[in-house]
Amino acid sequence: MGDQIKYQLDEARMPRAWYNIAADLPVALPPPLHPGTHQPLGPSDLAPIFCDAIIEQEMSTERYIDIPEPVRDVLVQWRPRPLFRARRLEKLLDTPARIYYKYEGVSPAGSHKPNSAVPQAWYNAQAGVTRLSTETGAGQWGSSLAFAGSLYNLDVTVYQVRVSYDQKPYRRALMETWGARCVSSPSNETESGRAVLAKTPDHLGSLGIAISEAVEIAATREDTKYALGSVLNHVLLHQTIIGEEAIQQLEMAGDDPDVVIGCTGGGSNFAGIAFPFIGMQLRGGPNAKKRRIVAVEPSACPSLSKGQYAYDYGDTAHLTPLVKMHTLGSEFTPPGLHAGGLRYHGMAPLVSHVKELGLIEARNYQQTACFEAALMFARTEGIVPAPESTHAIRAAVDEALRCKAEGKAETILFCLSGHGHFDMAAYTNYLSGKLVDQEYDEKELAMALSGLPRI
Ligand SMILES: *Cc1c(COP(=O)(O)O)cnc(C)c1O
């Protein structure tokens, strides 16, 4: 046997609690504001769309929140996930760096998203909710919630961004297999959808519009709550199981990352792998080594690197609370790129906040550069990554090449958030030279930013 590739935890060592970074922040997160009054939000303002347990987690400052036993019983089907050492990729790059990754692509839905879909569905079922509404970009979150809903007999309706509804029919088939109803967004089922279609009948859709539709349904129906797949504090909380596992596994490997990397759409898989490490640094003590934490986004939708840090709406119809985040403006429609899960105008308030505090870095890449790295990865490690995850791989490869140039044997850890088995059209395009880099429209961005609400 050669050198070790996988670092595995027993089921019994799966983390028993999620880590809440709010407990360790040197400056508290700016509060969400009511969209009408602009006053800080109270728990009752969220009650029409979320159940009490979720609202409590959203506002909690407890450092650790126990994962309920019945939720652990489901998560354990695909967790703990091994930590992989990318030895063959290291060899290809001829780098002195050690590259590790957490692979989230073997959950039932093929990404990290069931880590939050299962607890969200469980808490809602416990509260007597019978229907959930949600949005989905690339179809990953919609299929994760469809899977989770099927475990607890919840009726799930998914508003899927039109461009991916058309491009990814198999994601829809997956949602329907798990019993959910999938609707192309903008749709005729809601006021918000009809308003968009009246202005632009062939609108490609966006996450901002799909969120408006899903929130509207939840707010207007007694039996329905809303579930969000990223951005909010409780979603980031649920994903910290990734980083909590990685800390134990790197200890097994006798290693400690110098660089931690995740791709960022709304920020949940990035926060999942990164926040437990940032927490160690914030708390001080023997594990407080300063690690570089890198968030990676598409150049076509660079909210963290090019957006403004300001109060903005999470959706296009302005039904959601105002949250302080890096935003390209809720009116901004990013170009239709393959990494649909990264195509969101805003960023998680917690991720934006730690960026403002100087605790993380942000960078962005064009999609051809990402697919180039994805092929290196697929042809060495064997896994075909989701288009979103290719952004994290690009950054990990670049860091490893920097280590080579500087002659430094650093340790790099990244989150491989999902597999790309439903995204093979993107690979076909790349392999046939048809995949092109996408630029956003500067004028549209300026207009969207000038429309930010005045607080
Ligand atoms: C949804 C998704 C993302 C982006 O969402 P985050 O909340 O930023 O993690 C990234 N990768 C995959 C595979 C996804 O499905």
Image: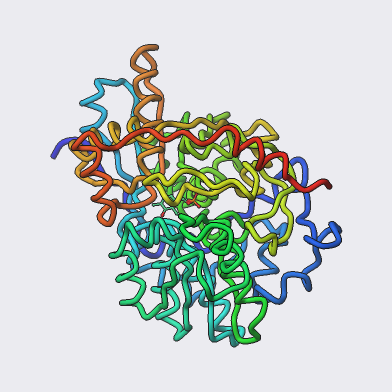
Residue 191 placement, left or right of 441: right
Q: Position of residue 266 (x, y in %)?
A: 54, 50
- Vertical position of residue 96 compared to residue 417: above or below: above
Residue 26 placement, left or right of 377: right
Q: Residue at x 47, y 83 (%)?
A: 155
Q: Residue at x 58, y 73 (%)?
A: 190
Q: Quadrant of residue 448?
A: top right
Residue 413 placement, left or right of 228: left
Q: Position of residue 401 (x, y in %)?
A: 34, 20
- Quadrant the N terminus occupies: top left
Instruction: Say which of 219 and 76 sits in front.
Output: 219
Q: How is the image coloured?
A: rainbow
Q: Kindly give the residue lying farthest to the left in the view shown.
A: 1
- Vertical position of residue 234 compared to residue 306: above or below: below
Instruction: Say which of 25 and 332 sits in front.
Output: 332
Residue 391 placement, left or right of 420: right
Say if residue 18 shows up in the picture.
no
Instruction: Say which of 293 and 190 sits in front.
Output: 190
- Vertical position of residue 415 compared to residue 373: above or below: below
Say if residue 398 shows up in the picture.
yes
Q: Quadrant of residue 141?
A: bottom left
Q: Residue at x 51, y 50 (%)?
A: 272
Label tally: 0
Q: Residue at x 37, y 36 (%)?
A: 367
Q: Position of residue 379 (x, y in %)?
A: 18, 37
Instruction: Say which of 200 and 252 sits in front.
Output: 200
Q: Position of residue 236 (x, y in %)?
A: 57, 55
Q: Kindly give the residue lying farthest to the top in the view shown.
A: 406
- Vertical position of residue 349 compared to residue 154: above or below: above
